[in-house]
Image: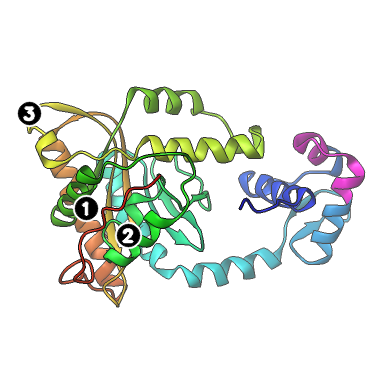
Amino acid sequence: MVARRSAPTQRVVQLLDFLVEQRGKRFGLSELARELDMAKPTCLGILTELTAGGYLVRDPHTHVYGLGPALIAAGRVAQDGFAISAIARGELAELSAKYRTTCTASAVVGDRISVLESTGPGMVKMGASYHFAPPVGLMYVLWDTDAAFDAWLATPPTVPLQQDEARLRQVVAECRERGYLVESLTAAGRRLYSLLAGVAARDLPDELRELVGELVTSLGERVYLGADLRPRKEHPVSLLAAPTYGGDGRQNMVLTMYVGASITGAEIARRGAALVAAADAVTSASGGRKPTEHGTGERTPTRSTR
């Protein structure tokens, strides 16, 4: 069942997102209404309520609006809830500097995948989120228990699909043994990434933005197996991903290194090792521990998703 969305609430979120993107710049009523394509009375009503709650401030002389102190308190509470992502920031920054690429830390929050940290050029928007349902989200259960994997597979898919059970078995086994995942970059995925380059999220209708997010993610869910990679041969790679773990030995976050180009199998191995080392450092620094073995003693999940 698709949850019903509230248009008035969407406009509130749209306004706050816009001001966050502007990084401290302030705007008057007319500017905001024009930028957000809102009627002035609607925009004024939202501004008035958010200002009364402390989420925005209004300059009494220039009559411009900016982000308010209530957001600071909310942000601190949210950050405390995701303290591990702050620990990951330093490791991600080092990887971004070394490989001159974008790196992220993300996790499943509720029923969505959320970006918690982002470093490097072309930073992914923090807070960006996607539906956590097949075919999106493989890497977020890949190193978790078999029960968690089965629960994900049982979730109604976002698009019709059929799962190759034999290949899924190989993907699970090899990625758990290797410690990281390598997603291929398909021709269709490359064209989609190219079309999206430079497009601001607010420039897309809500329904299209959500669909694009699913497409971008699902198009990358094609994993290289060990037999696919040759040390001297170049392979088109979308990204590499490795897990971090909590104190219970369960997977709790994914560190991602974006590639978006063809690199040799040897280079994939070097980057993969660096990413795993960063993920292990985050696990250790946050008081987590790597599991002695994955799963629950049950079979590796192979249920077909349709």
Q: Position of residue 120 (x, y in %)?
A: 38, 43
Confirm whether the magenta stretch covers residue 32. Answer: yes
Looking at the picture, tell me which residue is in the foreground, 30 or 124.
Answer: 124
Q: CA distance from mark 1 to mark 3?
A: 25 Å
Q: Which mark is residue 232?
A: 3
Q: Is residue 138 above or below residue 200?
A: below
Q: Earlier in the sequence, mark 2 or mark 3?
A: 2
Residue positioned 73% across, 47% down in the render? 15
Determine the image quadrant of residue 301.
bottom left
Q: Position of residue 233 (x, y in %)?
A: 11, 26
Query: Which is closer to the viewer, label 1 or label 3?
Result: 1
Residue positioned 77% across, 44% down in the render? 27
Q: Is residue 153 above or below residue 268?
A: below
Q: CA distance from mark 2 to mark 3?
A: 34 Å
The magenta segment is 31-44
Residue beneath disc 2? 149
Q: Is residue 273 left or right of residue 221?
A: left
Badge 2 local density, few (<14 within 10 Å), some, or many (20+)?
many
Q: Which mark is residue 172?
A: 1
Q: CA distance from mark 1 to mark 2?
A: 10 Å
Q: Earlier in the sequence, mark 1 or mark 2?
A: 2
Q: Secondary structure at mark 2?
A: helix
Which kind of residue does numbered mark 2 sit on? Phe
Residue 191 seen from this side: yes
Which kind of residue does numbered mark 3 sit on? Arg
Q: Secondary structure at mark 1?
A: helix
Q: Is residue 15 left or right of residue 269?
A: right
Badge 1 local density, few (<14 within 10 Å), some, or many (20+)?
many
Confirm whether the magenta stretch covers residue 301. Answer: no
Looking at the picture, tell me which residue is in the foreground, 70 or 266.
Answer: 266
